[in-house]
Image: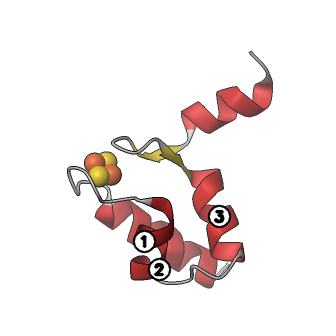
Amino acid sequence: MNTANTEEYENIVCHCTGTSQNKIKNLFAEGCTNFDAMAERSGVCSGCGGCEDAVRDLINDLKYA
Ligand code: FES
């Protein structure tokens, strides 16, 4: 197992879809700068919905970083 993969697993934001913080950061950089766009592209919140606050917080952090 390489370190990149380990990092991916450690930073999962949405466990239902296995979406990592890095993936969200990458999609943000590609233009998914709001929750709806992010959810559509990445699939986050398409399962239990429990990650919504974490995803919104992360997008806000990226916006004001
Ligand atoms: S953790 Fe994201 S939909 Fe369940």
> Which amino acid is tagged 2?
Ala
Q: How is the image coloured?
A: secondary structure
Mark 2 Cα shell of 10 Å, populated few (<14), some (14-19), many (≥20): some
Q: Residue at x 42, y 64 (%)?
A: 55
Q: Earlier in the sequence, mark 3 or mark 2?
A: 3
Q: Residue at x 31, y 64 (%)?
A: 52
User: Which residue, given by chain and number where applicable, does mark 3 sit on?
Assistant: 25
Q: Quarter-wise, where is residue 44 in the image?
A: bottom left
> Which amino acid is tagged 3?
Lys
Measure the alpha-carbon separation of dots 3 and 2: 13 Å
**In the displayed structure, does residue 34 sit left or right of residue 45?**
right
Image quadrant for the N terminus? Answer: top right
Query: Which structural element holds mark 2?
Result: helix
User: Which residue, given by chain and number where applicable, does mark 2 sit on?
Assistant: 37
Measure the alpha-carbon separation of dots 2 and 1: 5 Å
**In the displayed structure, does residue 60 sit left or right of residue 49?**
right
Residue 28 x, y percent position in the rendering: 63, 74
Q: Earlier in the sequence, mark 3 or mark 1?
A: 3
Q: Residue at x 49, y 61 (%)?
A: 42
